[in-house]
Amino acid sequence: MEYRYKTDLVSKLTGATSNQLKYWVRIDLIRPEINGRRAFYSFKDIVKLRVLVSLRKRGLSLQKVRFGITRLSEILPDDEPLSRLIIYTDGEDMIVLEKGKYFSAITKQHYFRFDTEQIGAEIIKLMADETRQANPKRAVSVS
């Protein structure tokens, strides 16, 4: 049996207010176990709530968060994908890193990553190689 956590502890762990938690339960974004009037949250719920609160604090709208989480559940094979992903936001999109690949949880668009510092280092090296080839050291003979 999985251990369940009370609302006050979950609120402290996630930074979500009790009103936010109640609202997110009401709109079915999170599904704690309800016993009477009390809600009890699983560890997976806490992970999901931390992601949710973090994305909201960084400016992503609740609608986009909800849509992105729904999309992730459709795209990825397991029940709780949030516990194993790295998620970024710019306040407009929800960018997910999974297995070295980046994609938008909202649009499903795939992104690629490249390192501009590496490109700069390669340019400097190639230019230095060209300079050495253009000005080889000449052997000086003494007669």
Image (tube, rainbow, N blue to C red):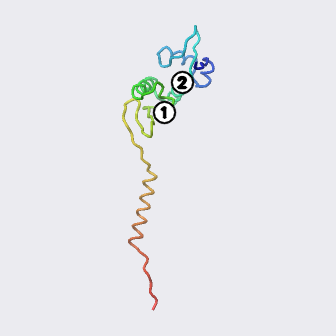
Q: Name the residue tied to disc 1.
A: 85
Residue 109 figure quarter: top left
Q: Residue furthest bottom?
A: 143
**For this rendering, which residue is in front, 41 or 63?**
41
* Nearer to the camera, 75 or 71: 75
What amino acid type should be assigned to the residue bearing mark 1?
Leu
Where residue 41 appears, as percent x and y from the top left, is 57, 19
Residue 10, quarter of the rendered image: top right
Vertical position of residue 130 compared to residue 9: above or below: below
Residue drawn at point x = 47 percent, y = 19 percent: 29
Say which of 23 and 126 sits in front: 126
Q: Residues within 10 Å of mark 2 (few under 14, many from 20)?
A: some
Q: Residue at x 43, y 25 (%)?
A: 73
Give the spatial CA distance, label 2 vs label 1.
13 Å
Q: Secondary structure at mark 1?
A: loop
The residue at the point 44 percent across, 32 percent down is 94
Which mark identifies residue 44? Answer: 2
Query: Which quarter of the rendering shows the C terminus?
Result: bottom left
The correct choice, above or below, for 142 with respect to 52 in the image is: below
Residue 66 figure quarter: top left
Residue drawn at (44%, 87%), measured in percent from left and top?
Answer: 141
